[in-house]
Amino acid sequence: MSRTITRITKEGRVNYAIKNRKSKDFQMLFYSTWDELCQKMMGSAEKWAQKEGDEDLLTVNSWDLPHAFMAFKITKVPCLVTCRRGRITKLDYAPLMYKHFNSAD
């Protein structure tokens, strides 16, 4: 089973993930289309998705959903938001995000 990347274009999907964070784990990658670092991160995420695993990655673009960035107080892109067992963590340090997407799990 391979991983999946889902592009979110409606704010309701972000709200649904936040509302159900205690029952369902998720990862959201917040990015901007015009930022070169974000484009490289998306490339790493696409390679990550080709590996074996059952995780899903939700992607949120600053152009489509600028208000979604406020939900997690995101001021820097790219930013990876992870929810595990109801606990939300933000990671906006690019080298650690590359490590996350390129790790050999």
Image (cartoon, rainbow, N blue to C red):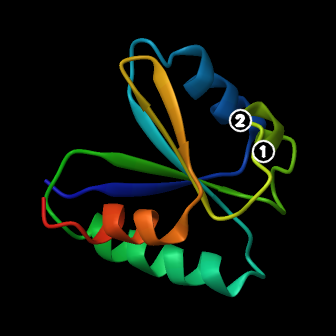
- Residue visible at 43% across and 58% down in the picture: 5
Residue type marked 2: Phe
**Residues at discs 2 and 1 in contact (Cβ within 8 Å):** yes
- Residue visible at 35% across and 56% down in the picture: 4
Image quarter for residue 101? bottom left
Residue type marked 1: Phe
Image quarter for residue 97? bottom left
Give coordinates of residue 86: x percent, y percent.
44, 17
Q: Which element is circle 2 on? A: loop
Left or right: 88 in relation to 37: left
Give coordinates of residue 62: x percent, y percent.
79, 59
Image quarter for residue 69? top right
Q: Which residue is mark 2?
A: 72
Q: Local crowd at mark 1 within 10 Å, few (<14), some, or many (≥20)?
A: some
Between 14 and 94, the one nearer to me in the picture: 94
Between 51 and 90, the one nearer to me in the picture: 90
Left or right: 65 in relation to 29: right
Q: Which mark is residue 95?
A: none
Left or right: 11 in relation to 49: right
CA gap between label 2 and label 1 equals: 6 Å
Residue 45 position (above or below residue 4): below
Between 72 and 59, the one nearer to me in the picture: 72
